[in-house]
Amino acid sequence: NAGVTQTPKFRVLKTGQSMTLLCAQDMNHEYMYWYRQDPGMGLRLIHYSVGEGTTAKGEVPDGYNVSRLKKQNFLLGLESAAPSQTSVYFCASTHSGQATVRAQHFGDGTRLSIL
Amino acid sequence: RKEVEQDPGPFNVPEGATVAFNCTYSNSASQSFFWYRQDCRKEPKLLMSVYSSGNEDGRFTAQLNRASQYISLLIRDSKLSDSATYLCVVRKTSYDKVIFGPGTSLSVIP
């Protein structure tokens, strides 16, 4: 049982390049999330999904797109990378169980640098 | 005002000390509350959920005050391994979004 797996773990891009970050979970969770974490800013929600085929914007969605074609996968795309998108990206998932215990399971993170 | 605010820290405490972290949230309709810990360059991991009546897990005690929109985490008998950043997390009512606080850094010193 791998939990939440993010690929790649590290990547360096040039400004203007595009790339896709993959998040895969094997826990049959309904909800999936993409966050970015920057020094002094905490975790900020980029986009999230409450089920296969659905996505919604979080706090900082600009410059990113997402897709949830399969329940177990949540893809985060950068169409034209900018230096401001240099960050650590975390994917998380959670089961739609009782509200009081719906904790999130995180992947190891992807460290992305845009030059 | 940020939706979730925490003590700025950092907290530097000796081994064996008791340390308390505070967290306030702005959305009175928030339903679920958690404390996560995050080690340096690692992913956040759930430490404990916070229940209305307060709850304890070993050396860790969490309290919730809905009237004041305030959450606390108490760590007794601090260990070196407790050194980490502690994140206060609040779940909003719609679509299960969660809001993370900025975190409070704890260093336990020998």
Image (cartoon, rainbow, N blue to C red):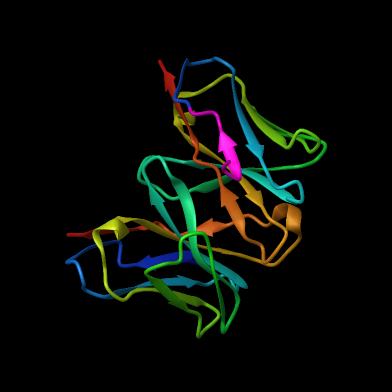
Q: Residue at x 35, y 45 (%)?
A: B41
* Percent x, y of residue B52: 80, 40
* Residue drawn at x 36%, y 42% as measured from the top left: A39
Q: Which residues are magenta?
A: B1-8
Percent position (x, y) of residue B76?
A: 61, 21
Q: Residue at x 73, y 64 (%)?
A: A97
Residue A3: tell me if it is visible: no
- Mostly what secondary structure, the magenta segment? loop
- Residue in the picture at 40% in, 40% down: A40
Residue B48 horizontal/vertical position (percent): 64, 42
Q: Is residue A76 above or below residue B32?
A: below
- How many labels were placed on the picture? 0
Tell me where residue B39 appears, x and y as whole percent.
42, 40
Q: Can residue A7 be found in the magenta stretch?
A: no
Which one is in front, B8 or B47?
Answer: B8
Q: Residue B108 falls in which quadrant of the image?
A: top left
Position of residue A98 in the picture relative to residue A85 (left or right)? right
Quadrant of the snapshot with the C terminus of chain A: bottom left
Left or right side of A57 for B56: right
The answer to whether residue A13 of the structure is visible from this angle is yes
Looking at the picture, does residue B96 appear above or below residue B68? below
Q: Quadrant of residue A82?
A: bottom left
